Amino acid sequence: MTARRGILAILLAVCALALTACGGFPTAGPVEYGNETGATGDESQNLEFLPNLPQPGASPAEIVEGFINASTGPGVDGDWARAREFLAPEFRDDWKPEASATVDIAADRVYTESQEGTVEFSYDAVATVDDRGAYEHAELAERNLSFSLEQQQDGEWRITQAPDGVVLDEDQFPRVFHRYPVMYFDPTWQYLVPDVRWFIAAKAPASITQALVNQPASEWLAASVVTAFPEGVTALASVPVTDGGVAQVELSEEAAAADAEVQDRMLTQLEASLASAGVLDVEVTAGPTPLTAEPVATRSTRLPAAPLILTEAQFGFLTGEEIDPIPGLSQAVLDSAPVAVQVAPDRDVAAGRLANGNVVRLHAENAEIELLDERAGLVDPTVDPTGTVWSVPREQPSALRVYPRSGGMREIEGAWPDATAIAAMAMSRDGTRMAAAVTAGGRTVLWVAGVVRDADGSPSALGTPVRIAIVGAPATGVTWIDDSTVGVLAAGESGATVLEQIVGGPTSSTSSPDDPASIAGGNGLSSLRVRATDGTLYVKRGVTWQPTATGVLLLATQQGAPR
């Protein structure tokens, strides 16, 4: 077997040399793909695109088209060398591809030679990624870029002026730019909170470190998270990674003055952030001085594999054909017969909405049922890690209230501005972000906002919401699929769908089981569940939904698991 692999490697190398020796490739037609050095066909994260080179005799429009198509290949060193082949030699070092990325629809691209040496490129933008790796959806509208070209001494046209940044088709974007969570702490220092960024794999360790240490969190999230890195501490731009997967991060010398707990938390953020780039360990220095930090324990937001359901006789976790009850809480659910339940991480309390529309807090202790909100038209409530219940009327999205576990009620002023209705909302399991399906501008959209808390941890406000998706149909449920992804159950004239939205990333959607009633997330897409109105429970497996139980009266959502 080893000999056969060696022969195959030699043949592949010979083929590669033969291809490299070709004088040029046509700029028209499909983009050619190949694997990055050292990658296998199974390592999709390391897939390297090999765009075409300029074709001899190509027109200015063809050169610009080839340059745009070359955005699919940043190269193994992340220098976009293929794209620079379309630029005049004196301009190659001036072009800055890392300035931004624009996501478009390749089929709608138009190249027009307005005059000799000038090409106008028209496209429909879907999203943009800024120089910090932050992804933002764009209103679908035609945009234009101008390119200037000159004939070189050999008679070939090359670009002498071009906008910074790259343009990528929406299907190619997630293959070229990869998703990396930059990790912060929640204000209690218990949970790690992802702030999703998009970088090319070749420069991911350095880009992630720069985003975490040298730059602030995304504006909409900044007031809801904290970082261990003291003000003034910066990271060196270079982050080498050894063959053994150890990233070597050099911080400025000020980091050495931080106390041991701060250094431990800094290391924790670095390790969690860099893990998505394949880093197995992190060595941190403050200037030349090694830091002897140890990662701190953080609370997981992973859920049990078993769904949490209510049948005619029991409430608890469905394991095989048995239901395991939650002590005290299961009895409170059975006594109150709610139509919606969300259980807090420690399973000592739950938020519920009753058949009469009232919102309650259910207690495991003594199976107590605490009446909270009697307003008309309330949506399903949500509960945060502190046991605080959030409630809002469907037709009054700004009338958001919280009910702390310590008692009383607080109005959240200025919640969901410009929304005329709210269909569903869900708190992230770390308590830092609220997602909601609202009506704004006459259409159903998915918003996310940071949760702002007082010094004692009580919620005081929602930050400015960010629109992360257009739902396109009336929403009936919202759930966190995992720490970075929100699921929306929507039902329109053409049928029901499940929208899967990365917070800070692209949108995808699939068909829902027939007649869906509710949705609940898990630990990823493979554990997403939907309950149908006939009581059938479905779980997503790949692109299909498989029935796993019948007779389910209610599918509860979970906000985590006990410590």
Image (cartoon, rainbow, N blue to C red):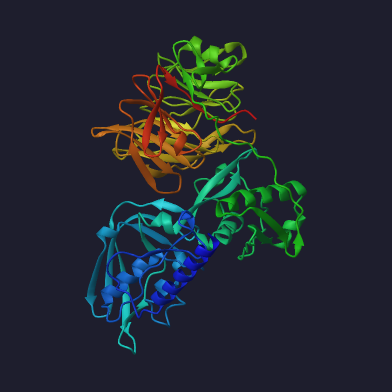
Classify 420 as above or below 145.
Answer: above
* 345 to the left or right of 535: right
Relative image position of residue 224 (x, y in whole percent): 56, 42
What's the residue at 43%, 26% (across, down)? 392
Q: Residue 156, position in %: x, y?
A: 31, 84
Which quadrant of the view contains residue 329? Answer: top right
Total labels drawn:
0
- Vertically, is 276 above or below 511? below
> Which residue appears at 53% of the width and 64% of the height?
3
Q: Nearer the viewer, residue 197 or 274?
A: 274
Q: Which x, y percent locates residue 359? A: 47, 19
Above or below for 63 versus 246: below
Taking the image as shown, residue 235 lies to the left or right of residue 372, namely right
Q: Residue at x 37, y 32 (%)?
A: 545
Q: Is residue 155 left or right of residue 129?
A: left
Q: Locate residue 135, reporting x and y percent.
A: 44, 53
* Quadrant of residue 344 within the rendered picture: top right
- Residue 163 lies, with reference to residue 329, above or below; the image says below
In this orientation, does residue 78 appear?
no
Q: Which is more toward the observer, 448 or 395? A: 448
Residue at position x 61%, y 11% in the image: 366
**Quadrant placement of the C terminus:** top right
Q: Is residue 561 visible?
A: yes
